C-alpha cells in the first residue's frame, strides 16, 4: 500500500485487467490513501482486499496466504516493500541493518518458501540498482537488494 504498490496496483487494473488484488502492508487498510485507492480500483472494476500483514513474520504470512479463496487462487506475488535507514559504515548498527533487511529479505524469503505450491505465473521482486553500485550510507539497503537479486536468480 506504499507509493510503489499503489502505482503498481493501478497499472495492473487499468493496463492488465486484474480483477482481484490482495494488497498487504504492515498498516493495511490504515495506511494513508488506502480508502481512495480502494474506491478508485473498485470503480475500475476490480475487487480489492487490503490487509495488514507483516510479511517479514513467517507465521503471519502463512495465515494470510491461507485466507486466499480457492475461487481466486494466488497467481502472482509482487514484493515492493522497502525501508531506508541510512548510516555511514562506521555508524551502522544492528538496528540499522535489521530495520532495512526484514521488510525486504525476510519477507521475500517467506513469500518464496510459502508460495512454492501455488500456481504462480509471476514472482516479482522490486530491487534497486543500489545493490550493484551502492549509494553513500546505504550498505544495508544495498545488501537487502542484492539478496533480492540472488533470490530472483535462484527462482529463475
Image: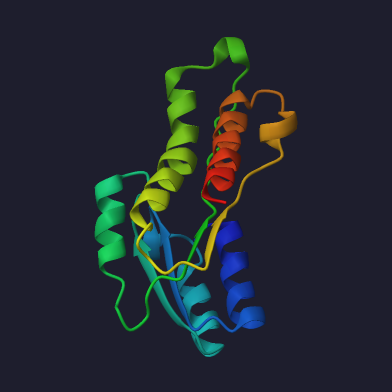
> Is 137 left, or right, of 61 in this rendering?
right
**Residue at point 53%, 44% (across, down):** 154
Q: How many marks?
A: 0
Q: How is the image coloured?
A: rainbow
Report if residue 55 is visible in the image.
no
Residue 140 point in image, percent of width and height: 56, 27
Residue at x-position 61% and y-position 24%: 139
Is residue 140 shown above or below 35? above
- Which corner quadrant of the image does residue 128 belong to? top right
Q: Residue furthest right?
A: 133
Q: Is residue 117 above or below residue 112?
A: below
**Is 60 left or right of 127, judged from the image as shown?**
left
Of all residues shown, which one is farthest toward the top?
90
| Residue 48 in the image: above or below residue 94 | below
| Picture coordinates of residue 34, whole percent (x, y) | 47, 68
Residue visible at 54% across and 31% down in the picture: 85
Q: Is residue 57 rendered to the left or right of residue 34?
A: left
Q: Position of residue 78 (x, y in %)?
A: 52, 60
Q: Residue at x 60, y 34 (%)?
A: 146
Q: Is residue 73 visible?
A: yes
Quadrant of the image occupied by residue 116? bottom left
Q: Position of residue 68 (x, y in %)?
A: 31, 72
Amino acid at each position: 500500500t506504499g507509493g510503489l504498490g499503489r502505482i503498481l496496483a493501478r497499472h495492473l487494473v487499468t493496463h492488465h485487467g486484474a480483477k482481484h488484488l490482495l494488497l498487504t502492508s504492515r498498516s493495511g487498510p490504515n495506511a494513508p490513501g488506502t480508502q481512495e485507492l480502494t474506491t478508485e480500483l473498485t470503480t475500475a472494476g476490480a475487487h480489492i482486499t487490503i490487509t495488514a500483514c507483516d510479511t517479514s513474520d513467517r507465521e503471519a504470512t502463512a495465515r494470510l496466504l491461507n485466507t486466499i479463496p480457492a475461487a481466486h487462487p494466488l497467481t502472482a506475488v509482487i514484493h515492493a516493500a522497502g525501508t531506508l535507514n541510512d548510516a555511514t559504515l562506521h555508524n551502522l548498527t544492528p538496528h540499522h541493518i535489521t530495520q532495512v533487511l526484514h521488510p525486504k529479505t525476510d519477507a521475500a524469503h517467506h513469500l518464496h518458501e510459502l508460495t512454492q505450491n501455488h500456481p504462480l505465473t509471476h514472482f516479482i521482486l522490486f530491487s534497486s540498482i543500489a545493490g550493484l553500485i551502492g549509494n553513500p550510507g546505504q550498505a544495508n539497503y544495498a545488501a537487502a537488494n542484492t539478496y533480492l537479486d540472488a533470490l530472483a536468480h535462484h527462482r529463475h
